[in-house]
Every structure is written in structure tokens, then in C-alpha cells.
Image (cartoon, grey):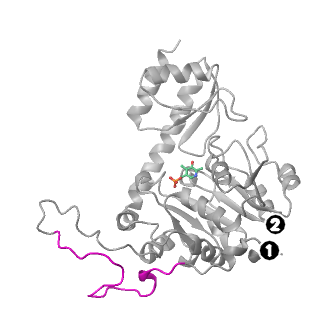
Amino acid sequence: MFNLNNLVRENIRTLKPYSSARDEFQGKHSVMLDANEINVDFSNSSTNALANYNRYPDPQQLQLKKAIATLKNVDSECIFLGNGSDECIDVVYKSFCDSGKDNVIICPPTYGMYEVAANIFNTVVRPALLTQDFQLNLYEIEKLADKNTKLLWICSPNNPTGNSIDRAKILSLLNSFNGIVILDEAYIDFSASASFLDVLNDHPNLIILQTFSKAWGLAALRLGMAFASPSIIKVMTSVKPPYNINAFTQDHVLKCLGMQDLVKKNIGDIVQQRNSLAFALERYSFVEKVYPSDANFLLVKVKDAKVVYKYLLDQRIVVRDRSNVTLCDDCLRITIGSKSENQMLTNTLNNFK
Ligand SMILES: *Cc1c(COP(=O)(O)O)cnc(C)c1O
């Protein structure tokens, strides 16, 4: 049986979290002398750029969470917000992994931060390579797991391979794995497969990560989301820095949430561009394979990745060289750009010899 308490680090289980001034009351009061802020009137300054940022932001991000809860059709208590998904990843390690004792399983080739964060937390990484068709190797994962295996990281659609992971295999792991399964859905909006959000309540060991950096086009604001049971969210919240989401980000994302139609249109355009770019790339003699993609990038195997990469760079086009990554020999990862950017890419490749 799943028991969250057995997975949370002991010092976190007994932690008395920092209680900020703004945790202790809600709403607007007229005289706020509780947080050592200054109350300066910037309205006469030549620029009012400084205005409205003299107060600390809501540490619980209640308004923003409420709006995201509506958007995603989950309860507010099931949402954790991080300074990018990167902070969500960090907070997961902080919550569950005892330095020098615990281990985690990752499934390479995949997003690099799972391993970097493990190294920062001095947590052993046990790699269970994806199969040749970039799917989970259940046998290998089950073989690697022991009583100190706290986390299993799955990325779907996966970066850098672009494919979605078989839903049945993820479900099977959710039922059999004794630690926490983190499912990173950073690219889910570009995917034909469904998110796992609709089965979140069925799986007490599941954390789903999503982000505003990709489909929403708000990478600079740094806003990542983690969805999980209220008990997991409570643990993660207890270890986060109190004011981790700044006021500008909270305000701006709230406004952007009203622009869903535009976001959906952009996603549709990118998916269309992805499909035509894949078609165009497949016809070059130096392209050996364009892998099927459910994301906003393509993994492309070429004859000599270093040479193509260098050629593009000399023509001032930057792609990601993934040729040193396991199972990705001679592969480049190419983000789907705007129509004109993609055209510049193919025009440039037309002259590659
Ligand atoms: C881009 C990306 C993210 C997003 O990270 P942020 O910190 O939210 O910008 C998360 N996971 C994967 C796999 C990604 O490729």
C-alpha cells in the first residue's frame, strides 16, 4: 500500500515551515506594517516603472491557482507553482530524497535536469534506458527499484526524442512502483495523446509537471506547475521559498489565461509547421530519419550531425546537437520556429553539400 509518510524525508515530515507575514492573513488592509516593506509614492517619478512592486507577492498564489484550477479542471489544493518547472523538480528532490542514501530512476535519453538535480542533492541516479523505439523498459525499471528508490522520472512527450510514452506502460508503473512517479508533461499541449490530469485522483503516487514556458510562450516569466494529491502538494509547499512566484509573473499570467483562444491557435499553427518541416527534412539525402514528434521540436538523424550543426551555426542558425546523447547518435533536435524561420532553415539546408 502507498504510504506518503514513508517516502517524505524525516526532517521534512517534522519540519515547521517558515510562516511569512502574508501567510497569516488574507485580503487588503489599509495599514500594512508587518513585512518591513517601504510605502513610497512613485507616482511623481518620470517613469512609474517602479510602481506597484513595493509589496511582497502572495506566497500562496491563491488567485492564480484558482484560475489555473478552473483552466485545468483540478482542485486548487492539488496545485503547486514553481519558479519554472525547474523549481518544481528541485522541490521534489528536497521533499523526498535523503542525500547519500536515496536513489532515483530516470529513463534516458531524457531531459537533463532530472539528473543534474539528483547530483545537486547527492542522490544516486539509476538509468533505465528507453528501448530502441524510445519507450519505457518496464523490466529494467522494476529490476532497478529497491526500498531506497524514491522517484521515477518519466517525460511524455519526451525531450529530446519527441514521442509520447505508451499510456498503458505509465499506468502499469503507477500501479506497481513503490515511490513517487513524476510525469513531465511540458509538451502535452502539442501532443495528440491525452494528459494524465484526468486520472490524477486515482493515483496517490503521481506528480504531473506542466509549464507556461512552451505552449503558452511565457518562458521568461518562469512559471511551472506541479499537480498531485493535496498531501503531496502540502509537503512540497512546506519546503518552497515563501515568495517563490514574483508579483509580475502572478499578475501577468492571470491576464494571459484569458487568451486561451490565441494560445490554441498558435499550437495548431506549430503542429502544422512541425508536420510540413518533417516532410521537407525527410527529402534531404543527408537526412536518415525524422522521428515522429508529439512536441514542438523534431529529432532528426543525419549522416554527420557535427558537420550539419557546424554548417548551420556558420549560417547563424542554432539547433541543438544531441549526437552525444545515448540512443541519439548523429541526431539534431530542431525547434519548430515561425513559418519564416523554418523557411530560412530549409533554404539554408538546400545549399548544404
Ligand atoms: C522545457 C522543459 C521544461 C520547462 O522548464 P521550465 O523550467 O518550466 O521552463 C520542463 N521539462 C522539460 C522536459 C522541458 O523540455
Q: Is residue 204 visible?
A: no
From the Cβ of disc 2, is ligand 1 less than 8 Å away? no
Using the image as rendered, state which of residue 196 and residue 240 is in the foreground: 240
Is 218 situated left or right of 328 in this image? left
Using the image as rendered, state which of residue 324 and residue 298 is in the foreground: 324
For the N terminus, which image quadrant?
A: bottom right
Q: Secondary structure at mark 2?
A: loop
Is 139 situated left or right of 184 in this image? right
Magenta stretch holds residue 33: yes
Vertical side of 36 occupied by 184: above or below: above
Q: Which residue range is magenta in the image?
A: 18-42
Using the image as rendered, state which of residue 36 and residue 340 is in the foreground: 36
The residue under label 1 is which amino acid type? Phe
Vertical side of 82 occupied by 231: above or below: below
Identify the residue shown where x is 20% and y is 73%. Answer: 40
The residue pinned by badge 2 equals 178
Q: Is residue 71 visible?
A: yes
Is 115 situated left or right of 319 in this image? right
Spatial distance from mark 2 to mark 1, Cα to Cα? 7 Å
The residue pinned by badge 1 equals 2
| Quarter location, residue 163 | top right
The residue under label 2 is which amino acid type? Asn
Q: Residues within 10 Å of mark 1 (few under 14, many from 20)?
A: some
Provide the major secondary structure of the magenta segment.
loop
Q: Which of disc 1 and disc 2 is earlier in sequence?
A: 1
Magenta stretch holds residue 160: no
Q: Answer yes or no: do the residues labelled 2 and 1 have beta carbons within 8 Å?
A: yes
Q: Residue 223: where, in percent of width, then height?
A: 47, 60
Identify the residue shown where x is 59% and y is 26%. Answer: 282
